[in-house]
Image (spheres, rainbow, N blue to C red):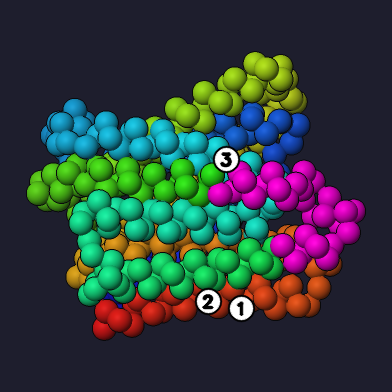
Amino acid sequence: MNTFIGLLIIAIGSFGQSSSYVPIKKVKDWSWESFWLTQGIFAWLVFPLLGALLAIPAGLGFCEILGAGGAWKAVIYGALWGVGGLTFGLSMRFLGVALGQSLALGTCSAFGTLIPALLKGENLFSGGGLILLIGVAVAIAGIAVIGYAGALRSKNMTEEARKAAIKDFALKKGLIIALLAGVMSACFALGLDAGSPIKEFLLAKGVNALYAGLPVVALVTFGGFLTNATYCIQQNIKNHTGKEYFSVPGNVFVNNILFCALAGVLWYSQFFGLEMGKSFLAESPVLLAFSWSILMSLNVMFSNVWGILLKEWKGSGTKTVTILAIGLLVLIASIIVVAISQN
């Protein structure tokens, strides 16, 4: 029962993340760098800080928590992840929600799951390590099928149809950016692992396991914010778009802030849900290690559902949509395979 609850919580958070790009479409009269920085303030600073406060008991100072170890490593990994987050947003721009997230998150899934296991000395060719490797392999296979469906979509759709679905569609540029985003985004998982002494310290202080990992999430997202903010401000200066924030009418400004805040809380929900869900998977080391891949696989699945709803696959043909559906089923199978093996 605990396994089901944990997976359900992770799935709810994943659905939130996969929905976070929908409110951004409602932002008006702001350039990409302006709305990306604004939603990032909410996604990487405001809501992670609020989440972290849930795990700080009365009488315990923030400096004392940081002194538990791993804080600076978490921030540094977060800064590296920030490069992935930045290019992740660009992959959505050039490939759309469905294909962009599929390729980026697929790469992120593999690196973010296997690298921490290897750093801990896990043998991936026997026992729990082998199950972990099989689960990741199945997930990557599903994502590869989805990627193939994306390639067919590009081939079958007319230029006009592609531009109608995705304004700045650019396949080659998008593929390179999506793969880079995936590799760098895996640093988030490394940041969580690096900050584990803080989580253990809070657990020893009696903090509920549901919230103990949230301060580490806040440290990693803070590092990511620094990277993204630097780039966005540089783009504001280069493109003379800094004045956009306050040059729009009052109602448009309020509209943009609200939708950026909504996008931010939806995005943050994936890691809020991941940390809470992992507390229910503690009895299964393999599922716990596979939780990152579970989150990424669910993100891919839900993002493609949104892609269908947003008509990004319209005009791509029945064969392409069928292959997409097969890829989604393989992703689900990767989660089921690992979950069953633990019962």
Asked if residue 37 is among those painted magenta in the image, a careful observer would answer no
State which tag comes first along the sequence, 2 or 3. Answer: 3
Above or below — where is 319 with respect to 62? below
Q: Nearer the viewer, residue 127 or 270?
A: 127
Residue 97 rendering spot, x and y as whole percentages: 65, 54
Asked if residue 163 is among those painted magenta in the image, a careful observer would answer yes
Q: Which quadrant of the rendered structure holds the N terminus?
A: bottom left
Span highlighted in magenta in the image? 151-179
Picture mark count: 3
Which amino acid does the dot numbered 2 rest on?
Val
Q: Nearer the viewer, residue 222 or 244?
A: 222
Which amino acid does the dot numbered 3 rest on?
Thr
Look at mark 3 in the image and give the residue it sits on: 87
User: Disc 1, disc 2: CB below 8 Å?
Assistant: yes
* Residue drawn at (59%, 26%) of the image: 232
Residue 104 rendering spot, x and y as whole percentages: 55, 52
Q: Is residue 34 visible?
A: yes
Which amino acid does the dot numbered 1 rest on?
Ile
Look at mark 1 in the image and give the residue it sits on: 326
Dividing the picture into quadrants, the one containing residue 58 is top left
Look at mark 2 in the image and give the residue it sits on: 330
* Residue drawn at (51%, 41%) of the image: 85
